Amino acid sequence: MARSDANREHWIFSQPLLAGREVYHISADPRDGTFYAATRHAVWGAHIHRSTDAGRTWDVLPSSPHHADGRGVEAVWCVSAGPADRPDRLFAGIEPAGLFVSDDAGRSWRASTLNDHPTTSTWQPAGGALALHSITLDPFDPAGMWCAVSAGGVYRSLDSGETWEPANAGVRAEFLPQSRPIAGQCVHRLIAHPALPGRLYQQNHCGVYRSDDHGSSWIEITDGLPSDFGYGLATDVADADVLFVVPEESSHMRTTVEGRLRVYRTTDAGISWTPLTEGLPQENAYVSLLREAMVNDSGSPAGLYIGTSGGPLFASRDAGESWSLIAAYLPRILALTAAPAD
């Protein structure tokens, strides 16, 4: 864990926490500040851990979400807080792909109706796994939420997760016989912007997309980027037209394009893109950035953080204009989160 003051210039690192575990996802519950971490261990399996002291100490939850049949659970890919009016509700996405709900703060879990949607027959394992990895609540409607499956697509609920519909209109799936199916797309990351109702962004296996209508339709905004493949997304919480991405070569060469670690920024919702490189390696930097390894904080100007599969961790405190290496010899970084210090 890394801590800094409000300037985000100097960082202090703790000793390893949750030692020996891969951390697939980490999040801070906006309702009470509780941290949740989805972990996987080669021997002990998949668990969810909880911290009530800003990440200093962790407890394991008594049960993990899992399919009741023989599929069980291979990994928990994400944990998300429920709406403010349901303080004990949590959502979790797992591998094999499924959405699970807890109404007792993670002591027990039940399967969501999404897991029985007719289009699940179109879901298939992607390069990483068949996983439900993104759960996004509507910042303006407590009954609205979206989930994303790789490979399966985006799904939307307007009734707190009771019913679901595919939300993939306009999104390519070039690896399927029909390139624009109702479901089956390979979503890499999905976020809803907190400043503009209906604004969503996704990094897909086949491009970067924006929605202005809660996911009913998508506009591809890949033009101006050096590739249509990548994983990470980050935003500026104050400006819904700002988005950051890190393109990678392709699904066959999942490293930075041309061996240059470049963060691309748009300030006009994807009409144009600018590469940001100051402080980032621009030669022989064939690194991978995974879906949860790029985040923004809520500061002004925006703070950004990117972690690579090789261990280096970079930070920017000026909305990407310049970057600093704040750690060089970490294990591969699967997930980051940024939260105000207590």
Image: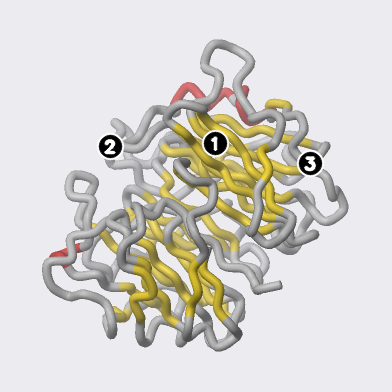
Q: Separation of disc 1 and disc 2 at Cα?
A: 26 Å
Q: Which mark is residue 175?
A: 2
Q: Which residue is mark 3?
A: 105
Q: Residues within 10 Å of mark 3 (few under 14, many from 20)?
A: some
Q: Residues within 10 Å of mark 2 (few under 14, many from 20)?
A: few
Q: Separation of disc 3 and disc 1 at Cα?
A: 16 Å
Q: Separation of disc 3 and disc 2 at Cα?
A: 39 Å
The amino acid on which the numbered mark 2 sits, given as a three-letter code, is Phe
Position of residue 289 relative to residue 98, above or below, is below
Q: Earlier in the sequence, mark 1 or mark 2?
A: 1
Residue placed most toward the observer, 285 or 321: 285
Tag 1's secondary structure?
strand
The amino acid on which the numbered mark 1 sits, given as a three-letter code, is Val
Percent x, y of residue 333: 39, 55
The amino acid on which the numbered mark 3 sits, given as a three-letter code, is Ala
Quadrant assignment for the C terminus: bottom right
